[in-house]
Amino acid sequence: MSRATTSADTGGKSGGLARRGLLLVLSSPSGAGKTTLSRKLLEQDFGIAMSVSVTTRAPRPGEVDGRDYHFRDVAAFEKLGDDGALLEWARVHGNLYGTPAAAVMEQLATGRDVLFDIDWQGAQQLTGKAPADVVRVFILPPSAETLRHRLETRAQDKPDVVARRLAGAAAEIEHWAEYDYVLVNSDLDMCLENLRTILAAERLKRSRQTALAGLVEGLLKGL
């Protein structure tokens, strides 16, 4: 599949105009599909980059340090927090997760969009740090039965971990109303298309078009 041409493909520009990047947050209960949606969005849109989180959990089969996560022990993670090097952090299912600040803010300033696969705690903290830059999307499963089936058949977690994730799903879903957009992932392709539509619209917001004022000033002078 060919990827979509995006404003950020040309150096953070929309219609030839420079713009500020955005922070696209995806949250959902485990098993609702946000990781698959994130992967497919990144495959189709080179104008957005994944924020690589730091975590204390063990790698899953196929995961690579530095690509999927920065895997660190608890002491190393806590030092990052003490040094102010994390934009947000949270404890999820007994493990620590956090977002390194420097790389994210550098991309944002140059017009590059950044994608976050984080929970509601991280979304709240990130919004507190950069409220004008964050776009929050919550992904819901179509039913509780579907969510349970996805968790039980993806063969990545032990039964006790699956049970813990199911128990935590309700607590995660309770925060759906804090998000700017909510998508129900009953059909993956349709959900992905809706996500891409949200991203396209948010990129075109007047507040993110940093060169518009200069363009308008030039137009008025020439009339």
Image (cartoon, helix red, strand yellow):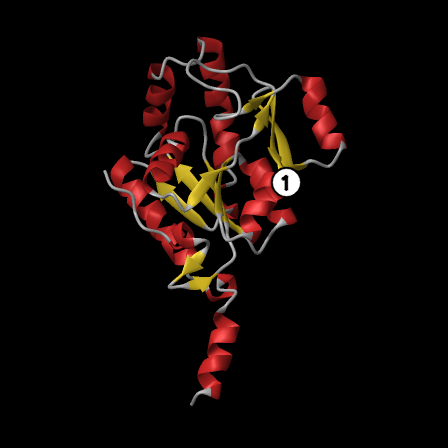
**Left or right side of 161 for 95:** right
Residue most toward the left?
1
Residue behind mark 1? 102
When the figure is inspected, residue 168 is found, relative to residue 88, above or below; the finding is above
Give the percent coordinates (x, y) of residue 83. 75, 33
Q: Residues within 10 Å of mark 1 (few under 14, many from 20)?
A: few
Give the percent coordinates (x, y) of residue 126. 60, 44
Give the percent coordinates (x, y) of residue 162. 45, 16
Amino acid beneath label 1 = Ala
When the figure is inspected, residue 219 is found, relative to residue 145, above or below; the finding is below
Residue 25 in view in this figure: yes
Residue 187 in view in this figure: no
Image quadrant in which you'd find residue 45: top left
Q: Count up the numbered dots.
A: 1
Give 19 or 207, whichever is nearer the viewer. Answer: 19
**Left or right side of 199 for 90:** right
Element carrying mark 1: helix
Give 164 or 196, whichever is nearer the viewer. Answer: 196
Residue at 40%, 33% in the rendered image = 34
Give 200 or 7, whichever is nearer the viewer. Answer: 7
Residue most toward the right?
82
**Left or right side of 121 for 209:** left
Residue at 46%, 15% in the rendered image = 60
Residue at 54%, 52% in the rendered image = 110
Residue at 23%, 38% in the rendered image = 1
When the figure is inspected, residue 67 is found, relative to residue 43, above or below; the finding is above
Q: Where, quadrant-wise, is the C terminus in this rendering?
A: bottom left
Give the percent coordinates (x, y) of residue 43. 34, 36
